[in-house]
Each structure stands twice: as C-alpha cells, then as structure tokens.
C-alpha cells in the first residue's frame, strides 16, 4: 500500500488539550507527517519548535476562520481586508513550518447571492496570486450541510466551476471523502471525476466521523484500493474523531501499511 497518510492534530490526540503537545504524540505513533486546522492560538515559534522536535513534516494548515461562529471570509462581501489579513497570517505560519498547502475557508452564507459568488472568485484569485509567489497550493473544500449548516461552499460543481474560472496551478480541490459521501455519494464515479482537480484528500467514517474501520456507510478498504488504482500520490489527512484512545485506534493503519511507521 503506497498511499501516504498524515495525522490531523486538530482532531486526533485529544488526550492532550494543547496542539503543540500533539506533535510529539503523532511522532510516537509512527507518523512522519501531520496537518492541523488552526495553529494560530499558539505562538508561531512554539509551533515551529514542536514540529522540529517531533521531526515531522507539516503538510497542511487552514487559513484563520475568524470568530467561533465563523468559517472564513472568502465568500463574504465587505470582508476583503479581513480575508487578506487572514491569508497573510496563514502564509507566515506556512512558510515558517515549511508547509506547502493552505485550506482557504469560504464562510457561512445562509442565502448565497451573486455578490457572494463574485466576492468568492475575487478573493480566491487574489489568494492564488499570493500563493504563486511562494509555491504554496491553496485548497478549497466543499463541506456538508450537517457538519457546517450554511457553509457557502457545499457543492462540488460550484468548487470545480470556480477552479476552472480562476485556472491557477496554485488553487486546487481538497476532497474529504466524509463530506463527499454526504453531499453526493456515488463515491467511485465522483472520486474518478474529481481527482484531476485534487491535491489533498481527507477521510473519516460516516456518520460519526470516527476511524475508517468503524461501523458506517463507507467501505474504506475499497476506497484505498481505488485510490491506488487511480495512482493518487498526494497526502491523505486523517481528519477523524478517534472513538477511544488515538494511538490504539490506529490498528487499522498499521494493518493497512504492514508497518508501525507511516
């Protein structure tokens, strides 16, 4: 099995409440690479030191989400300054962490209008140009209505349309199979059709968002085989809530890889 997996430190290792402590726990479990959503509550120097001490690669971070009730600003007219500041902050963390992928969040929009569509395209175009200067890949991700009611980007058709319009090598799709199942289903055909746009995958079981080998709607053994057959070579982030102890719950990955190192 040649697929590459990275631990998501925002979901996994909840045994400790501090992001920086989770870097070492991931390394002890056998991970060589990690991702996380929002590292901004910790000083950049502490995050960099934790990553360095754990000797892991940082694959992905999210741009800042804003307040607790916000999920980004990209599709919200009038928030261009906040959006640009969020990209600037994300870039500073990504560069210091040697991280090449930033997930740009769209925001909560209850009834999207043409103004939202225009703001989204304008802001993403701006971000893509900034990313190009540093060799960073910006990612957009549709999120299902159950996990984030009112999230603007809840359609893969909309995501692909925006990517085609902006047409930047530095703006791609983040495909979370947990969300894909709930938004569209028909996983085989949708993965095949979307994969040319994809530069990062995440996963969790549906509906409880636990490990992929827990009871649920998705046969991940088949999904992994499919991704190998399609020669997917980018990272797969484990954005799931461990059912019990994080490390013990990794038995599925150790069995899949035939190794304690991944």
Image (cartoon, rainbow, N blue to C red):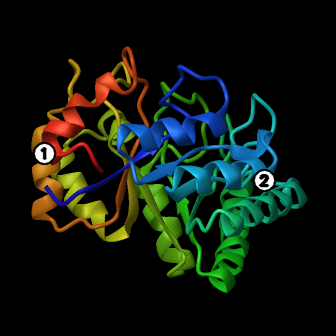
Residue 260: % across, % down: 24, 42
Precedes in sequence: disc 2 or disc 1: 2
Q: Is residue 75 left or right of residue 154?
A: right
**Within 10 angstroms of label 1, few (less than 14), some, or many (20 or more) residues?**
few
Residue 41: % across, % down: 78, 39
Residue 158 is marked as none
Residue 111: % across, % down: 66, 37
Q: Quadrant of residue 204?
A: top left
Q: Is residue 88 left or right of residue 213?
A: right
Q: Residue at x 81, y 54 (%)?
A: 77
Q: Quadrant of the N terminus?
A: bottom left
152 up-or-down from 90: above or below: above
Q: Is residue 206 visible?
A: no
Q: Nearer the viewer, residue 231 or 173?
A: 231
Residue 147: % across, % down: 51, 27
Question: Which residue extends farthest top?
Answer: 244
241 up-or-down from 106: above or below: above
Judging by the rendered image, the residue that carries numbered circle 1 is: 258
Distance between mark 2 and mark 1 Cα atoms: 35 Å
Q: Nearer the viewer, residue 130 or 94?
A: 94
Q: Residue at x 12, y 39 (%)?
A: 221
Q: Is residue 113 visible?
A: yes
Does dot 1 land on a helix, a strand or a loop? Answer: loop
Q: Is residue 231 left or right of residue 91?
A: left
Judging by the rendered image, the residue that carries numbered circle 2 is: 44
């Amino acid at each position: 099995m040649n697929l590459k997996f990275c631990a998501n430190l925002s979901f996994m290792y909840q045994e400790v409440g501090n992001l920086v402590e989770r870097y070492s726990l991931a390394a002890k479990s056998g991970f060589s690479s990690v991702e996380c959503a929002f590292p901004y509550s910790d000083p950049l120097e502490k995050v960099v030191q934790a990553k360095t001490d754990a000797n892991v690669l940082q694959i992905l971070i999210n741009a800042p989400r804003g307040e607790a009730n916000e999920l980004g600003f990209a599709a919200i007219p009038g928030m261009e300054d906040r959006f640009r500041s969020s990209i600037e902050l994300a870039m500073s963390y990504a560069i210091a962490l040697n991280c090449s992928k930033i997930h740009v969040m769209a925001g909560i929009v209850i009834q999207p209008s043409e103004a939202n569509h225009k703001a989204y395209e304008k802001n993403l175009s701006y971000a893509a140009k900034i990313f190009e200067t540093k060799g960073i890949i910006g990612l957009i991700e549709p999120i299902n209505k159950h996990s984030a009611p009112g999230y603007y980007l809840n359609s893969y058709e909309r995501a692909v349309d925006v990517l085609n319009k902006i047409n930047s090598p530095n703006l791609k799709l983040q495909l979370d199979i947990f969300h894909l199942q709930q938004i569209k289903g028909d996983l085989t055909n949708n993965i095949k059709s979307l994969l040319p746009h994809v530069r990062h995958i995440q996963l969790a079981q549906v509906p409880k968002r636990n490990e992929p080998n827990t009871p649920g709607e998705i046969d991940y053994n088949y999904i992994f085989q499919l991704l190998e057959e399609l020669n997917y070579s980018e990272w797969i982030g484990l954005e799931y809530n461990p059912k019990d102890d994080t490390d013990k719950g990794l038995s599925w990955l150790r069995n899949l890889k035939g190794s304690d190192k991944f």
